[in-house]
Image: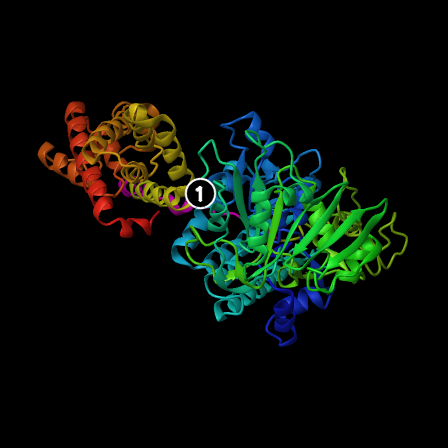
Amino acid sequence: MVVADGARADLARQLLDEGKLPQIKQHVVDRGCYRTALTVFPSTTGPAHIPFVCGIHPGTANVPGYRWLCRETHDRKRRSIYRHRSLNSPRGLMVGRDMDRQKSLSLFEYFDKPSSVLELIDYCPNQPLFKIIVRRLLRIVQAHKSDNWSRVDNMVERQIIKRLKAGSKCVIGSFFGIDEYSHLYDPFDKRTIGAYQNIDRAIGNIAGVLRDLEVYDETIIAVVSDHGLSSTKVHIPVVDIVKQHGFDPYYYPRLYCRKRDSAVMESGNSMAALYFKRGDKWGSHWSYDEMAAEPRISRLMATLLNTEGVSFLGARADKDGVVFIGPSGMLRAASTADGWDISVEGVNPLIDHPTGRFTREELMQRTFNDTYPDAVNQLALLCTSPRSGDLAISSEPGYDLRWQHEDPEHHGSHGSLHKEHMHVPLMVSVPIEDEFVYNYDLVPTFLALCGKTPEKPTDGRVLSVKGYDLRGPQTSPSAPSLESAVSNNPGHTGGGVVSNDATDTSPDELCLPDKKKSNLISLLITIAIILMGIIVTAIFKEDILSFGEHLMVTYGETWVDVILFLLTAVSSSPLALPIWAYALVGIALGYNVLRLAAVMAVGSATGSLVTFLLGKYFSKSDWVKKRFPNIHEHPWAHGKSRKYVTWILFLGTASPIPCDVFYVACGAKQYPTWLFWITMVLARFVRYLYLGYGFLYFRDFFDMFL
C-alpha cells in the first residue's frame, strides 16, 4: 500500500487520463480499478491514516484530529501527557499510542515480517518503535529544512524495495511530497504535480522488483490517499475571535496555563474543534441546545457563522443526534434504529443534502457526490470519541482557520467536510466492483482477499472484487485467493506498499583504517549532535517554549532561579536540548538579563560537565578502547596546548554551535576539570548576555524563530 498523502481524486484522474502516470496505469489501474473513495472527517494527515492500517474511523480510534484535548484526563491528571496532543509535537510521532487499543486492530499483525515506511500509525510489531520514530524524525526534519520532499519520497521507495526483498508480506509506505508541496505552494503547482509523477516512477520500480521475485501476480498494489487539498488564500484567526468573546483558550503552542476555560484545536487548518469548560471542570461535552442557551457561546457561534469563509458549525444534538448550523438555518439528524431521520429548518447549511429517513449506507450513497459528502455519518462517528470537541468548524475552500503560529504559511489546506478534501483517489490492482467506497473498507477487504478474518470489528465492509468470492472459501480454480496463491509460490516474499524509515548504512562502508575510522566517527557524532539540536529546535519548539513559560508563570520569581538552573543543567547534558529557548522565554516574561545569564550559565555549565566527565572516565574503559582506539589522539585536542584548547573551548561554547564532542575530547585528554568549569561558565554567560540583550532590542528578528 502506497499512501500518496494529500492526493486529490480529480487531479489523479486527470493525470491518469493524460498519460502522465503510466506506471500506475499499467501496474495498478489496468489490472484492477480506479475509484473515487471517501476519506474521514477530519480529513487530515494522521487521523485519516488510521483507516488504512486499522479499518476504523478516527472517532472510533479516539484520535479525533490533528490536535485534540481530552476533557476527562484534564480533570483527573493535570500533568498527564495525554491531556492534549498536536501531531507537530514530539508525542505526535506516536499516534498509535493514543488510539483505543480495544477497538483498533493493525493490518501489520496479520502478515509475516510487516514493514512500516514513514507510516504515522506505529503499529508494526516487526520494527522497534524507537527506530521508526528516530528515522521518521530525521527524514521529516531534513525535508522541512530543505523543502526537498522528493528526497524523502525517494527514500521511502528504496525502503519499500528493501523490505520486499527481505521477505515482507505487508508493506505500508507514506509519500508526503504531494501534501507538503501543496501546503508550501499550491495543490496544482508544478512541484506538486512532480510529486505525483515521482510516486508513479516508484510504482514502476516496485513492480519490477515484484516481477524479479516472481510474486507480481500474487501481490496487491494499492495507491491510496488520506485527504484532498484546496488552494488557500485567506487565514481566519479563530483563536482571536474566541478571545474577543471573553474566552481564554488553549491553543497550540500555548497549552500550559492551568486556568484556561476553552480550547481551539485545528486539524489540517480547514477544520477546528472548539472545547468549552463547565465551571472549574471540563466535565461532559456540551450539546448544541446547551451552547445555544449559554450567552457567551451563543454570541461566539453567531460571530463565527457570520465570518466570511466559515461554511457551518457542527455539534452534538440530544439523543445521539448531530446538528449542522449555518448562518440562516440548520440541519438536524436524529438517530434511528438503522439510520437517520433528517430535517432542515430555514436554509440548508449542507446545500444539496437530502432530508427524510435513510439508512447509513443509503445516506452515504445519496450524498457521495454532494458538496459535503456523507457529512452526517462522518460527524456522528467523530462525536463517538471522548476526545472530540463540542463544536466543529468547517471552512470553505480558499480559507483555513489557523492564522497564528503557522510557519511556513500554508497555501493549501484540508481537514473540512467539503468534497475537495473528502474525495480521494483509490487505485488498486484488484478489480473492486463497488461504486461507493470508504477508505476504511480496504483493511477488511484486503484481509478477506488473503483469507484472513479481522479479530476486532471494523467500521468498513468487505468490498466486492470481481473473480473472488470473499464470503467464504474459494471454489473457482480460475479465481484462487491471494493467500493460497502466495502459499503455493515458494518464491513469494511480499506484497503491498506504504510507510516511513531511513536507509541503513552498510558495515562495509565504514571499513577504514583505524585513524580515519576514529576521525569519521567523531565527525558523524558531531553532525548527529548538530542535527539533533536543529531537530529539537524545529520540531519540539512548541512544547519546549510552552513548558518553560508554564513553569515560569506558575511558580513565579521566587522559584525561577531553581527552575532555570535545573532546565539548563538537564538541557546541556548529552540530551543537547535547545536551552536558548528558555533564555528567550525568560526575557519575554520580564526576567532581568544579567540575573538570567548568570543562573543559566551555572546551570548549563553543570550539564556540560556531565558530558566532559563521561569523556574523562569512560575513555579509559576497555569498551571505549576497543571501539575507539585512537580517542586519546583526537585531532581536536591531541598535541594542543592548554591555552589553545581553553580559547577554542570558550569561543566555541560562547557561539550557538553545539560543542559536545569537543567536551568529550577534552575529558578524554584529561583536561583540568576546574578549568573546564570556569571556561564553560564564562562562555555560557557571554552567550546568554548577547541572546538576552539581542532579544530585548531586536525582538522582531527573534520572533521569526519563535
Q: Is residue 266 magenta?
A: no
Percent x, y of residue 214:
68, 57
From the viewer's perspective, is residue 671 above or below residue 440?
above
Decide which of 362, 459 is in the foreground and name it.
Answer: 362
Q: Residues within 10 Å of mark 1 (few under 14, many from 20)?
A: some
Is residue 370 depicted above or below 238 in this figure? Answer: below
User: How many dots with numbers?
Assistant: 1
**Res 484 visible:** yes
Magenta stretch encompasses residue 502: yes
Q: Residue furthest bottom?
A: 18
- Residue 146 left/right relative to 81: left
Q: Residue at x 37, y 42 (%)?
A: 532
Q: Nearer the viewer, residue 240 or 80?
A: 240
- Viewer can see residue 499: no
What sort of colour scheme is used for the picture? rainbow
Q: Where's residue 642, x and y in %?
A: 11, 32
Name the residue rendered at 50%, 38% in the picture: 91
Q: Quadrant of residue 111?
A: top right
Q: Nearer the viewer, residue 248 or 194?
A: 248
| Residue denoted by label 1 | 253
358 vs 395, left or right, is right
Residue at 79%, 60% in the rendered image:
365
613 above or below 501? above
Give percent across and percent down for residue 233.
49, 65
Picture quadrant of residue 520:
top left
The kind of residue on which mark 1 rests is Pro
Q: Quadrant of the N terminus?
A: bottom right
* Residue range (magenta): 498-521
Q: Position of residue 625 (x, y in %)?
A: 30, 28
Q: Classify residue 594 by image quadrant.
A: top left
Q: Secondary structure at mark 1?
A: loop
